[in-house]
Image: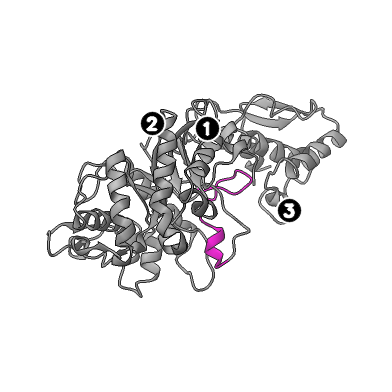
Amino acid sequence: MPSPTEVVALLKAQGIQHVRLYDADRAMLRALANTGIRVIVSVPNDQILGIGQSNATAANWVARNVIAHVPATNITAIAVGSEVLTSLPNAAPVLVSALKFIQAALVAANLDQQIKVSTPHSSSVILDSFPPSQAFFNKTWDPVMVPLLNFLQSTGSYLMLNVYPYYDYMQSNGVVPLDYALFRPLPPNKEAIDSNTLLHYTNVFDAIVDAAYFAMSYLKFTNIPILVTESGWPSKGDSSEPDATVDNANTYNSNLIRHVLNNSGTPKQPGIAVSTYIYELYNEDLKSGPVSENNWGLFYASGAQVYTLHLTNSGTVFANDTTNQTFCVAKSNADSKMLQAALDWACGPGKVDCSPLLQGQSCYEPNSVASHATYAINSYYQQMAKSAGTCDFKGVASITTTNPMVVKMLPA
């Protein structure tokens, strides 16, 4: 994986203002300091039993992973575990205690107003999710859900929910249309209608979120907002996952961003935006399971985009950089041995994806050290967000406003 400083450079270059971490990695939190980026840190599942049984353990966790980093690092929430009820049910009895102990430590440090505490749930804790008005939480979990919702309400926190229309579509045996999962426009006769409320649903995402709202209201909780802590679509899959494609991933995430940013809310809660985290920033090539597990990322570990989102007028998200159109190229008089060293470094320790330079690939021609070096050092410069000192390579590189990739593709 890229280093924490490289990750933060990518976040800044892409204008990403909110990030969720699955732990509270010290180096990552230090790299995020003084950026203003809002951070959710997480208590890993394997620490919940300890924290849920000991106030002191919880206080120690908060001291080490939160108090040590604020206010320089803008921590706004703590996610206690991930899908605990469905993936680690033996920790469920102490889950609410863990939240309360973490909250108590924040109160003691006078941080409870700016940092909220919650726990992300799989949407599978909701049963009978269509029509949404009939949805309810799996009653097995009532002894946890009721005190949990009481805690969220009393602390002004939110229900954290992971929402995956991809899995609803895959598991529906053809009942859920692909267009309905991807937010594509549906003819009025294809929209799903909740027969109890007569609300029209044009996408799976809204239906799942409203099912959670209705499930909470079934337990008499009506004013807890929902934060979607994961949603996304894989860009590649094995033969049993034919709809895990780059085009579908791009369509889903582009439409999701547009849907969230237009503040339309859901049919049940119109006008109340559902803040959402996209799963995930980077592809994870070492994950086990089906091929799709490795391919949820928007970026490769090199910093290259897996795809460019189809977006217009949605703020700074993945906007093309028109204000700082600079590139890093090999100097025409540079020593070829020094250029080769720069090329080797960028493709190795620099973590640039140099596969397009292989014979037969798109950037192999012209096959010269200078041309290949320019590709590699410019890729490094761009993935480091053009930050100072990233276009020198011991004096063989210089900054230009002419895009070398465009020049390269001109006919001879």
Looking at the rendered structure, which numbered label has been put on residue 392?
Answer: none
**Quarter of the figure with residue 399:** top right
Q: Is residue 313 left or right of residue 369?
A: left
x and y percentages locating residue 219 in the rendered image: 21, 56
x and y percentages locating residue 190 in the rendered image: 22, 65
Looking at the rendered structure, which numbered label has been put on residue 114?
Answer: 2
SS category of the residue bearing label 1: helix
What distance separates the C-alpha of mark 1 from that of mark 2?
23 Å
- Which residue shows up at 40% across the image and 46% down it? 99
The one of 295 and 156 positioned closer to us in this rendering: 156
What distance separates the C-alpha of mark 3 from that of mark 2?
50 Å
Q: Residue furthest bottom?
A: 173
- Which residue shows up at 49% across the image and 45% down it? 42
The one of 99 and 14 positioned closer to us in this rendering: 99
Magenta stretch encompasses residue 409: no
Sequence-first disc among 3 and 1: 1
**Quarter of the figure with residue 233:** bottom left
Please indicate, yes or no, whether residue 9 appears anywhere in the rendered image.
yes
Q: In this view, does 177 lie to the left or right of 187?
A: right
What distance separates the C-alpha of mark 3 from that of mark 1?
31 Å
- Circle 3 packing at 10 Å, graded few (<14), some (14-19), many (20+), is few
SS category of the residue bearing label 3: loop
The residue singled out by tag 3 in the image is 358
Which region shows up in magenta? 289-307
Looking at the rendered structure, the kind of residue marked 3 is Leu
Sequence-first disc among 1 and 2: 1
| In this view, 182 is above or below 329 | below
The residue singled out by tag 1 in the image is 12
Of the two numbered discs 1 and 2 in the rendering, the one whose residue sits closer to the viewer: 2
Its colouring scheme is one colour
- Which residue shows up at 47% across the image and 69% down it? 242
